Image (cartoon, grey):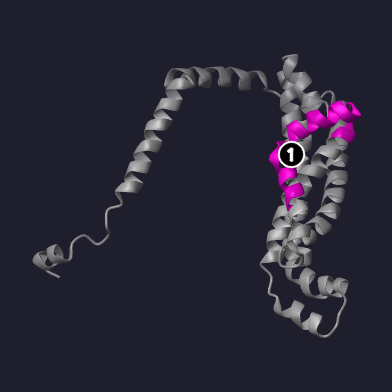
Amino acid sequence: MTADTAKNFGPAFKTNWWARAGWLAAFLYAAYAANYLDVSWIRFLRGLGNGAEFLAEMVPPNFSRWQLLSANLMETVEIAIIASAFGILFSLPVGLLAARNLMPLWITWPFRTFIALCRSFHPVIFAILFVKAVGFGPLAGILTLIFASIGFIGKLFTEAIEEISLKPLEALRASGAPFMSVIIYAVLPQVLNRFIGFSSYQLDANLRNSTMVGIVGAGGIGGTLFAAFQRFDYDFLAAILISIIALVMLSEFISTRIKKVFQ
């Protein structure tokens, strides 16, 4: 194609001035927000120096209180496993009742609203509420993570059910199969692998979240972590962080093996 012919056809893509204006507005707002929030390179560079000093105080890690560390880690694992088990158990019927291709609207909307409420707040907010309701300890952490699990797994499970093929359902319904048979033989086989994946991921998330909710008194190693930070006990803090990382990596390895078994 010659240059004259290209000129006749014009540019290959039409310029989208609205998109460019939107990007410019976003950049200007980001610059304004950074200035308003006192975000500056000086503070960032100063923070690098403070961070280096903080990391230097964490070396070498202090594992001398391994009994306290192991006990809190075990409590964290117990909280995560119990919360995941009940969260997965409750998410299954909630997800089924919230699927719009299985249930009428008057049933789906209350359960979809419940899932939205479970997803509306950060686990720390739920932990504060349950600590106030049932007191300090693992029970508050378990209740917190059950609601977090329902919010995550329930939503993804509902979406997975709504994406299934309806032909097996129609075939079973046409043969006169009861509702539970339709669920067991037509719905669950299509979403079982995804449900297992959601559940294993939520177990990993609960292990991480159980360390976080402990900061507000909901049990687990989070309380010990926060106490070590307040006491400037940074070498023990490093030992706690290393233990949490090792725990999450172990959980990731186990969940990967479980997925391979069910594939």
Query: What secondary structure characterizes most of the magenta part?
Result: helix
Q: Amino acid at mark 1?
A: Arg
User: Dividing the picture into quarters, in which one does residue 231 lie?
Assistant: top right
Task: Please provide percent x and percent y for residue 41.
Answer: 43, 22
Q: Looking at this view, is 74 or 162 the one in front?
A: 162
The C terminus - image quarter: bottom right
Give the vertical position of 33 relative to 139 (above or below). Answer: above
In this view, which residue lies farthest toward the front? 106
Q: Is residue 259 left or right of residue 78?
A: left
Q: Is residue 251 visible?
A: no
What segment carries the magenta color? 112-140
Q: Is residue 15 visible?
A: yes
The residue beneath circle 1 is: 208
Task: Please provide percent x and percent y for residue 98.
Answer: 75, 58
Q: Is residue 131 left or right of residue 125?
A: right
Give the vertical position of 140 relative to 197 (above or below). Answer: above
Give the vertical position of 228 relative to 126 (above or below). Answer: above
* Element on which disc 1 rests: helix
The crowding category of the residue bearing disc 1, from other C-alpha atoms within 10 Å (few below 14, some 14 to 19, many at least 20), is: some
Q: Residue at x 77, y 70 (%)?
A: 187
Magenta-span inclusion, residue 164 = no
User: Dividing the picture into quarters, in which one does residue 182 lie?
Assistant: bottom right
Q: Looking at this view, is 162 or 233 the one in front?
A: 162
In this view, which residue lies farthest toward the left? 4
Task: Please provide percent x and percent y for residue 210.
Answer: 79, 36
